[in-house]
Amino acid sequence: MAKKVKNNRKCGVLMPVFSLPSKYGIGCFSKEAYDFVDFLEKSGQSYWQILPLGPTSYGDSPYQSFSTYAGNPYFVDLEKLIDKGLLDRAEVDKVNFGADPEKVDYARLFKARFDVLHKAYVNSGLSDENKKKPSAELKKAFDAFVKENAWWLEDYALYTALKKRYDGLSWIEWPEEIRLRKKDALKEAREKYADSSRFYEFIQYLFMEQWFELKAYANKKGIDIIGDIPIYVAFDSADTWANPELFQLDKKNLPTAVAGCPPDAFSKTGQLWGNPLYKWEYHKKTGFKWWMNRIRQCYKLYDVVRIDHFRGFDEYYAIPFGDPTAENGSWKKGPGYDLFDVMKKEFGKIRVIAEDLGYLTPSVIALVKKTGFPGMKILQFAFDAREESDYLPHNYVKNSIVYTGTHDNDTTLSWYKTIPRADRNFAKKYLGLRSNKNVTWEFIRATFASVSDTAIIPMQDYLELGKEARINTPSTLGGNWVWRMKSDACTDELAERMLDLAKTYGRKNECLK
């Protein structure tokens, strides 16, 4: 009798939190998020992959955050605050958080959401504005949270309070004594803006409380969370302001070089991200302490961590600060395996996905292989009629994660309609398509049938949506990170169809009934 082989084949859905439906202008940790977890359970999924959870800054991108540790205030569920008596429902219902249920209006959210959260803060009794004392239970829980997270929260809260004081200006434009973190100036600022700082600590307390409740609910249902850690932090962030020694900055704390990508077929002038670059020699001397703290926090928030721009750990692209494009950059040596060696010794066996997309040199390929981390395969990248591609399913290895596309790709339906005819004909031939009907589902089927251990599908592809549902177009500003799913999209019929596919290709969550 043949021995039964343990099945490691799994599947999941890529769905940003902000794309969930809700009545408050953006997806959040509300009932709709719990309903989405229930939908994942019904459809046989093992994973919910999300984008970074941090507070967004420039361009509303989750990859340009004010903090690598903090959570996005927009994700705090206002319904829970109403239920706790921290907000009045009638007052909240009067606020316009955005008129379009299928798009996020970040400008309106910025104006409205913080005002509402501040009312909850005042009503909590923690604020200096209210003579009412907080409940003993809240005070105890809040104080414990602040103490446990002081190592990052104190700097983040003061940074955010100062940013409000200076009308949103980047910290590099603050008065010199604050910008350079002079001891007396910092002490004075902490005292002067204590209440404002406590407000931002309160938001983080609410965020973490609600997120861990949602994560626990998902885990109990057999759904693991795949989170995302960007390789870089934003220049205008609490991280850079509070830890200038970690980055390639001059005596005035201005960058000497910034991150990006060189020119390629997709961008003639390259991609100028503008993030500060790391002083890798300094990190190595400290035993990568800052990185270990960062990764430890990630594994509190997520079950699996996708490391964005994995190539940057082998070699990173450095662009002279002040250059208008990425054309004059050069490649520099990164930390290589040393960082991951320390990480494995520190945390033992942890689940990681290496974002190894784009042009890969032999040294990058060797680094991914040495770590043992699964890399990514994107089906949309496979169909170039001119040459054989590593992204064709017959070239996959088991230790990989396959996607139809990611948050940086167009939806599969829109992509298929716009690619060159020769590439489309090649795709039709490879997938055995006899017509253009059900195209998206045939691409999904190909990922599920592949040998890759895990298949992750963007929610937009399951919904067969077009370009209107694209999450992000790299190297562009405006119109990104705004798509939201309709409230009636996750039907029982769709769940049944997804479950059938998971069963057919041996990917059904074995924890589920």
Image (spheres, rainbow, N blue to C red):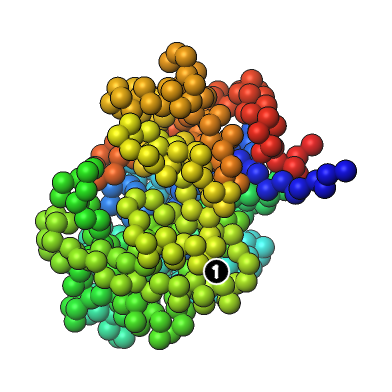
Residue 102 point in image, percent of width and height = 41, 28
Residue 72 point in image, percent of width and height = 44, 52
Residue 27 point in image, percent of width and height = 48, 39
Residue located 35% across and 24% down the image: 424
Query: Is 435 displayed left or right of 344 in the figure?
Result: left
- Please state which amino acid type lies under the numbered disc 1: Arg
Residue located 49% across and 29% down the image: 443
Closer to us: 135 or 257: 257
| Element under disc 1 | helix
Extreme residue in the right direction: 1
Residue located 22% across and 48% down the image: 264
Residue 106 point in image, percent of width and height = 34, 41
Which residue is under mark 1?
Answer: 296
Residue located 31% across and 61% down the image: 234
Query: Circle 1: is it few (<14), some (14-19), or many (20+) Cα within 10 Å?
Result: some
Query: Is 108 displayed left or right of 102 in the figure?
Result: left
Closer to us: 389 or 315: 389
Q: Up-down: is 346 above or below 209?
A: below
Can you tell which quarter of the image residue 380 is in? top left
Q: Up-down: is 20 above or below 208?
A: above
Closer to us: 361 or 439: 361
Q: Is residue 312 visible?
A: yes
